[in-house]
Image: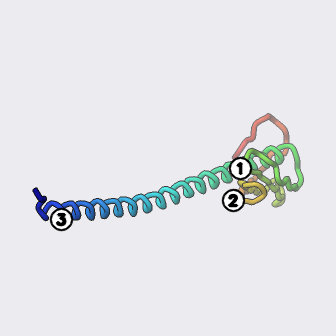
Amino acid sequence: MKRPKVLSTSRGQLLLFVLFLLLITAIMAGGLSAVWESGVQTTGLERNTILAFYLSQAGIEHAKIWVKYNSGTTTQSNIALGQGRYSFTVANLGGNSRRLTATGEVLAGSEIIAKRQIRVDVDRVALTQASDTWQEI
């Protein structure tokens, strides 16, 4: 007994449908992988930016300690800490006023991949060593 032609046509249509479905799935998978990769890159950039900010905050804290025990102007640079470094400068603005500037840098080898800077002007700096804490006004 011979098979009717309707069945062979249905199999051909089913094969085309499956191939089309596989093509759509491949396109969607490619798009999702591109979105996934950019999301991972963005997360890495955010992490490095935050790390650079924290390093610059460490530089400001170091500068505060330096101001407490010293009265002049100085530059301390390239203090390594973890995956990066920070540097700070203290500028005498006259009288008891100082400008503290700190820069935090995240490194990949010798290349800077993120950098943040904080500048703080401090008035009425107490140049005496009254206690072991920083007193902010």
Q: Sequence order check: which comes first, mark 2 or mark 3?
A: 3
Query: Residue sitting at 12 percent across and 59 percent down?
Result: 2
Q: What's the amino acid at mark 2?
A: Ile
Establish if 52 lies above or below 131: below
Tell me where residue 97 appears, x and y as whole percent. 79, 55
Query: What residue did someone put label 1 on?
Result: 55
Name the kind of residue labelled 1 in the image.
Leu
Task: First in sequence, mark 1 or 3: give its number.
Answer: 3
Residue 32 placement, left or right of 6: right
- Camera-side residue of 81 and 75: 81
Q: Residue 49 appears at what percent x and percent y? A: 63, 55
Question: In the drawing, what numbered circle is on residue 113?
Answer: 2
Distance between the alpha carbons at the discs numbered 1 and 3: 69 Å
Residue 79 lies, with reference to residue 27, above or below; the image says: above
Nearest-to-viewer mark from 1 and 3? 3
| First reached walking from the N terminus: tag 2 or tag 1 | 1
Q: Which mark is residue 7?
A: none
The residue labelled by disc 3 is 9
**Could you tell me which secondary element the residue under label 2 belongs to?**
strand
Q: With 25 as the anchor, is 97 left or right in this view? A: right
Q: Extreme top residue here?
A: 131
